[in-house]
Image (tube, rainbow, N blue to C red):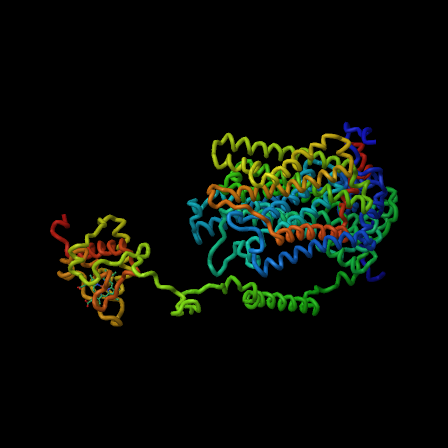
Amino acid sequence: MSSTIDYSQELSVVEGKPPLRSIDDAIIKPLDSKPDKKYYMALAVTISMLGIGVIGLALSFYYGTGLWGNNNPVGWGFPIVNFVFWVGIGHAGTLISAILFLFRQKWRTGIARFAEGMTIFAVMTAMIFPAIHVGRPWLAGYLMPYPNQHSLWVNFTSPLLWDVFAVSTYFTVSLIFWYVGLIPDFATLRDRTSNKIKKIIYSVFSLGWRHSNRHWQHYEMVYLILAGFATPLVLSVHTIVSFDFAVSIIPGWHTTIFPPYFVAGAVFSGFAMVQNVLIFIRKIFNYEHIITLDTLEKMNKIILLTGMLVGYAYGMEFFIAWYSGVQPEQFAFVNRAFGPYAWAYWIMVSCNVISPQLFWFKKIRRSIPVMFVVAVFVNVGMWFERFVITVTSLSRDFLPSSWAYYTPTLTDFAILIGSFGLFFTLLLLFTKTLPVVSIAEVKAVVDGAQPSHKDH
Amino acid sequence: MSEKILHSYSGIFDTPDEIIHAAEKTVEAGYTKFDVNTPYPIHGMPKAMNLEPSKLGYAALVFGLSGTLTALFVMYWMAAIDYPITVGGKPFFAFPKYIPIMFEVTVLAAAIGTVSTMLFFFFKFPNNAHPLHDTSYMKKVSSDKYGLIIQADDPKFNEDEVKVFFASLHAKDVEPVYYDMEDINASPKIYDKKFIGGLALTFILVSGITYFTLNKLMFMVPFNWMMYQDKLTVQEKSSVFPDEFGVRAPVAGTVARGFMPYEFPNEPELAGEVLLNPLVPTEKNLALGKKKYDTYCSPCHGDFGDGDSRLRGQFPNPPSLHSEKVRNWSDGRIFHVITMGQNIMPSYSSQLTREEKWATVLYVRALERSKNAKESDLK
C-alpha cells in the first residue's frame, strides 16, 4: 500500500472524514475511562525508575556531590550532559507547535499538543540538573538578580546566567503556549462532563471560554504572535546552551559552529523522542487516524535532514580544527576520535550519522518497528554527543599534567535513570488528565470542516 | 421565570457554509450585538461578521519593547552603576553581552503581556457566570454544531422579528437564553469567610515554611555541612598539637612574601641617613600621599600638619610638623617615625605599605613647603 502514496498533492491530515463528535469521543476517552492494566504496568516501571533517581538524589544531598564522578578536571560530567540532552529533547515540541505552525504545516495539528507537553516535561527534567550541579540547590535563588543583603548582583556577562534566563523563559513561554492551546479544549471538556468535581476543575481552567468567534479572532492572533516569539526563542535557547561551551576557551568548545550545531542536534533528538513516544500513544489510544503514518513519515524526514546537519557539523569541526592550525584544537579532535573516549565518539557517529541514512528508503520511513529502532539509536547517539563534547574536552585540556579519565559513578547513573523516570511518569499522567491531541485544532482540519468559500 | 431577564436568542446550524451565510445575513439585517459560537475558528468568519482586525499585535509590540528596555536598563544600572565589578577585563557596560538576556526578557514580557491582555482585558476572563454557560446551546457549539446568538440589548432587537429572522435562515433549536437574577445580584465573594480563612492559612503556611527553612533547616544536617567543616579556624583549640594552638607559628627565620622586616627598628638617626625616598613628587604620588595622610595622620596631626587634632583632648595633641626640627629631618627620618611610631604615636606599619609610607612623606613635605615657601617658590 505504501507504494500507492501520491506525494504530488497535500494529503488530508486526518484520515477518513470522522464526524466531529467522534473526535471528541476518541480524544476524551482516556480521560473518562479507568486506566487499564497496561497503563498501571507502565506507570509502575516509570515510577520505579523515578524512585531510583530519588534515592540517588537523596544520597547526593546527604553525602554531597562527591558521590558523583565529577572531579578535576572534568567538573561538568553527567549533570551537564543530561541537562543539555533534556533541554534538546524539549526543542522538538516548540518546533512542531511554533515553527511548523508558521510554515502552515497542517500535519502538525495531531501531534502538536503532545509534543508541547513533552517540551514542558523535558525542560522540567532538564532544570533539575543545573540545580543539583550547583551543589546546594536550596541556594539557587541567588541566580536571580534580586536586592539582597550582600548588595551584590548576578554576573550578566556570564553565559551560565544567560542560561538561567533562557531556560526559565523557555519554560514559561512553553507553558503559556500550551495553556492557551488548552483553553478551548477545557471548555469542550467542561460542557461534556457529568462529573461535578471535574466540571469545576474544567470550568476554572477554561476561564469561561465560550467558543465565541469574536474571541476566536483574537485567539488566532495570539497564537500567531506566540508562535512568532517562540520560534526565535527556541533557537535562542540551545544557542545559549551552546554558549556555555563556546564562550569558554577550552579546545573543542571554543567554536562558532556550536549554536547552529546544537540547535540542529536538539531538533534531531527531540523529533526522535517525540516519534518514539507517539508510536506508543497512537497504538494504545487508537489515534491511528489522527496521528497518521504520513505524519510519522514526515517526522522521519526531518530526522533524516537534521541528522545530516549534525553529521556535517561533525565533519566541519574536524576541518576547522585542522584548518585553524591551532595545535591544542587539532589535538582535541584527534583525541575525540582516537583517544581514550573513542568508544563514545564512534557510538555517537554510528547512531547519529549512519543510522538515520536508512530513512532514505520510503519502506523504512513507513515501517513502524524499523523507524522506532532508528529513533532509539538517534536518542542514544545524541546523549553520547553531549557526553563526548563535555567530557573529552575537559578531560584533556591544555595542560597534560592535569589530564584525567572521567568515570561516572553508580549515583550518576541512578540520577540519569531517575530523569527518564520523571519524564515518562509525567507523560503518562498527562495522557490520563488532559487531551493529548488538540480537539479544536484537529476539528478545524478535518475535511469539510471549513466553509467551501465559493466566493474566494 | 419572572425573575429572569432575556439575554439573547440562539439558533443552531449544521455546516460551516450555513453559519458563514447566517453571519453575513445577520450583518446585512443590521444587528451589531450578535455572536457566532463554533467549536473551532472558521476561516472567513471575521470578514463575514464584519469584525475589525485584532489589535493584539500592538500589545505584543508594547510589552516586548518594554521588556527589552527594562532588561537593558536594569542590567546597566546593576552592573555599571550600583555595583560595578570588572569581569574578564570587559567594560562595565558590556552591551553585546547583554543581548541574550534582553532578548529573553523581550519574549517573556511579550508572551505574558499579550496573553494577559487578551484574556483579562479583551475577554474579561475568567467569566464562568456568563448566561450562555450551561445551556444546551453551549453544549452543542462546544462539540460539533455552529451557533448564532442575537443579544437582547441590540438596538434593533425585537423578539418576534428575531424569531422570524432565525426561521428565514433555517436555524434549528431556536431558543431564548436568560440571565439568572441570582448571578447578577451576587455580591463579590472577597469577604467570604472561606476566602479570608484560606488567605490566612496561606499566609501562616508560607511564613511558617519560610521561617523553618531559613532559621531551622539551614542549621540541620546535612545542610549545615558547609558551615561547620572539619577544619580549624583561627581562634580554635587543637587537639592535635601539644601546645593546643590551632594556628601554627611559622618556622623560625621565615619571612612572608611582602613582609620584609624593617632594617633599623632602634636606630632613627641611622635610618634618617641611609634611607632615601624612592618616589618623586609626581601628581599621582602626591595624590596617594594625600589620601593616606588624610586617612591615617590627619585625625591627630590636623589636615595641614599643624598639630590641631580632631580628637578634642582625648589624646595629647602632637607637635606641629612645620617645626624647624621636622623640616630639617630627612625623608628617611620621617619614614622611621611612621614605621616605628614615636613615644605615644603608634606605628603605622600594618596600615601602610612601604610605597604608601614614602608617598605620605612626600605629602608631608608638600605641606611643610606650603607654609614655609622659599623665595624661589614664588616665582
Which quadrant holds the C terminus of chain A? top right
Give the x, y percent position of residue B311. Answer: 27, 69
Give the x, y percent position of residue B104. Answer: 57, 46
Image position of B170 (left or right of B278): right
- Give the farthest residue toward the top: A8
- Give the farthest residue toward the bottom: B314
Quarter of the image where one finds residue A227: top right
Q: Nearer the viewer, residue A118 or B240?
A: B240
Q: Nearer the viewer, residue B372 or B296?
A: B296
Image position of B247 (left or right of A202): left
Number of callouts? 0
- Give the farthest residue toward the left: B375
Image position of B141 (left or right of B260): right
Give the x, y percent position of residue A357. Answer: 69, 32
Vertical relation: B28 (above or below) B184: above
Q: Nearer the viewer, residue A451 or B241?
A: B241
Image position of A380 (left or right of A407): right
Residue found at x 66% / y 55%: A53
Q: Nearer the viewer, residue A414 or B348?
A: A414
Residue found at x 68% / y 67%: B198
Can residue A209 be seen here? The reply is no
Can residue B310 be seen here? The reply is yes
Give the x, y percent position of residue B3. Answer: 82, 62
Residue found at x 59% / y 59%: A61
Vertical relation: B85 (above or below) B51: below
Which quadrant holds the N terminus of chain A? top right
